[in-house]
Amino acid sequence: MNVLSVTSELFPLIKTGGLADVTGSLPKALQTCGISTSTLLPGYPVVMDKIKGAVPLLAFDDLLGEQASLLHAQVDDLDLFVLDAPALFNRPGGPYVDEAGNDHPDNWKRFAALSRAAAEIANGALPSWKPDLVHTHDWQAALTSVYMREMGCTLPVVLTIHNLAFQGQYGVDRLHAIGLPASTYTTQCLEYFGDISYMKGGLQTADAITTVSPTYAREILTPRFGMGLDGVLNERVMALRGIVNGIDLDVWDPATDTYLPRNYDGTSLKRKRENRAVLLERFGLDHGEGPVFSAVTRLTWQKGMDMLAETADEIIHNGGKLIVFGKGDHDIEAALLATAARFPGRMAVHIGYDEPTAHLIHGGSDAIVQPSRFEPCGLTQLYALRYGCVPVVSRTGGLSETIIDANDAAVSARVATGFQFHPVNTDGLRLALRRALDTYSDTRSWARLQNQGMKTRFSWERSAEKYAAIYANLVGNRTDGGLRRLGA
């Protein structure tokens, strides 16, 4: 089976979060199921630099008013289609924001163009290759199925929601500019509280909808987590399924990780202290005893980083240290930096992200803090488990499914892997930090948590099999009139 995956980011070429990790590792896992995936992504400068010598396949003279070309390349084990549209993607900044952290003003056009190109491929624009199924990811690719149905293309489409908070909502005046007719501006397609929503259009026209954990699949059916789309999702609940993300065990393996000064495994956890020493030096923190807590995440309200700024003193006053590594909302960045300034040598904040440092943090820290207010799945806690770094997480979404709380029963059964807290507020987080600090003082109990976490296996194998089953069901049931159409 040939699958066209459509995404705005892909590891190892371009990454801002977990979306890239998923779209980069799932195709490899699907190979064992007999599924070949080709991934379409935008030609950002960093992507173009990594695919020199790519083969041109197709020219677009008028892709929403812009000239573009489709390139084919191989990077590692990934088969790629790259949309080279300089007017849309050749610019400084990140995939979604400029160098000042503001949204690119033409994101509405940039990702509509990506979706339109994907629909053209699905509809047979490449004589030598056509997919059996299209898999779109988040709002940036969600218009693909809308364009496909307008073209009369009946290939099945799977849409994966990685984070429903981001929906691609724009004014209805953009409809003509993205090449869609007025007939798509209905409650059964794009219309969303007087605007258009790319995500809603995808939800209404995809044949199957997945999200990245079963708990999150249930949560988004409620007004609290549905972000205004809970009504649509409840109408399509029979097409909705939650599948927990996996991680690439080759990339995230402390025994072989080339980013770590010292490799280790579950039988040699003492070596982790050598990474700790390098980590503390890297961030300018005092050496000495006491646990090292870290947060590797976007610094946003969703991720609860404002709560961490308010509770950092709990760690510091109990002899611990805290490292925060990421970027996000300016106000939250400022609050964390101000907190760190109160605790020189005990707390460090670095605004930015790079892969080697993220690996070092997992390899050198004792605990990872993830106080997310909502979390579709989360990958950081899975990396932490793999590296013997004990997670402290809120009880929501995928965090609640992947971490077993160190309550008395779980500790007695020796299955606990971390600390959960609820309600998700500063009081809940503070109590969870206290529990973690108390447990750390018992060397044997902490080592058991580390070892149990390192034994867990969140590989892609089982999850890939579930995706493969969805694909096979859709392709097997395909008829020219049997798939989801506009207004159906």
Image (cartoon, helix red, strand yellow):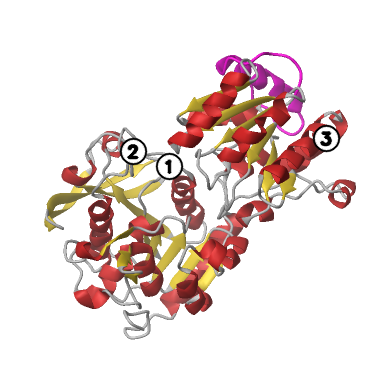
Crowding near the residue tagged with mark 1, few <14, some 14–19, many ≥20 C-alpha atoms within 10 Å: some
Residue 261 shows up from this direction: no
Q: Which residue is mark 2?
A: 94
**Placement of the N terminus among the 4 image quadrants:** bottom left
Q: Tell whether 179 sits left or right of 365.
A: left
Say whether marks 3 and 2 touch (CB < 8 Å): no
Q: Are marks 1 and 2 in contact (CB under 8 Å)?
A: no
Question: How far, Cα to Cα, is label 1 from label 3?
Answer: 36 Å
The first of marks 1 and 2 along the sequence is: 1
Task: Using the numbered discs, state the Cα–Cα distance from disc 3 to disc 2 in whole angstroms.
Answer: 40 Å
Which mark is first along the chain, 3 or 1? 1
Q: Is residue 380 visible?
A: yes
Q: Which residue is mark 3?
A: 439
Q: Which of these two is toward me, 102 or 409?
A: 102
Residue 398 in which image quadrant: bottom right
Instruction: Find residue 442 and report its image quarter.
Output: top right
User: Picture coordinates of residue 373 (x, y %)?
Assistant: 59, 50
Mark 3 or 2, nearer chain start: 2
Q: Quadrant of the C terminus?
A: bottom left
Q: Amino acid at mark 2?
A: Gly
Q: Which residues are magenta?
A: 261-290
